[in-house]
Amino acid sequence: MAGDHGATEIFPGLWLGSYKTIQDPEFMADIDVVFNCTKNLPMVFNKKSFRLPVDDNLQKVEIDMMSSLAAEIVFHIHNEYATNRKRVLIHCYAGRQRSAAVVAMYLIFIYGLTPRDAVTFIRSRRPEAFAGGVNFLESISRFRRDFSNRCKTARMVHNIRVPIAIGASV
């Protein structure tokens, strides 16, 4: 459940939050990297920050923008969180759609979840996530399809056999 700072810890050190979150200096003191999933909200100046410039208005152009930048953003999240062991905040205005969609894509990347399973997992941690429906479901589904195709191609090219254990750590 989200605290007074408006953020929910999805995994230790990986937070999903809202604009309210970045306005809490005590909470932000423990964050190393910020992913801002908005076009216009200010960036956090004293932290390493990334921007995913997307509006949450259900317009095709925004869904396409989310889809086109998803792999790059997920790569940066993985690099900062898993590789560099940084404490990461992913936020949008309300912490319900854009940032939650990005976290869903990260779960797909890490655990091979389906979009539905990723959304369900996030809602189990942050019930207000995806309130009213999943606005970026098309982007999440595209990411899964594209990611699965790339993995399949890589395994074929390198003759890699990967055992499947989906959801074991989730």
Image (cartoon, helix red, strand yellow):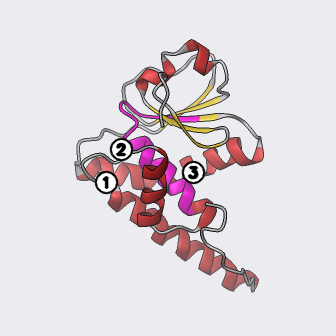
Separation of disc 3 and disc 2 at Cα? Answer: 16 Å
The reply to whether the C-beta atoms of the residues labelled 3 and 1 are less than 8 Å apart is: no
Separation of disc 2 and disc 1 at Cα? Answer: 7 Å
Query: Is-magenta flag for residue 103?
Result: yes
Q: Nearer the viewer, mark 3 or mark 2?
A: 2
Residue 153 visible here:
yes
Q: Secondary structure at mark 2?
A: loop
The reply to whether the C-beta atoms of the residues labelled 3 and 2 are less than 8 Å apart is: no
The residue shown at (43%, 64%) is 115
- Above or below, 117 relative to 96: below
Task: Please state if 9 lies on the left or on the right of 36 as rendered.
Answer: right
Task: Report the amino acid beneath label 2.
Answer: Gln
The residue shown at (61%, 72%) is 166
Mark drawn on residue 97: 2
Q: Quadrant of residue 10?
A: top right
- Bounds of the magenta span? 89-108
* Residue 122 rendering spot, x and y as whole percentages: 47, 51
Query: Is-magenta flag for residue 22?
Result: no
* Residue 109 rendering spot, x and y as whole percentages: 59, 61
- For marks 3 and 1, the one nearer the N-term is 3
Mark drawn on residue 134: 1
Task: Report the amino acid beneath label 3.
Answer: Val
- For marks 3 and 2, the one nearer the N-term is 3
- Above or below, 93 relative to 52: above
* Residue 126 rendering spot, x and y as whole percentages: 44, 43
The residue shown at (36%, 25%) is 40
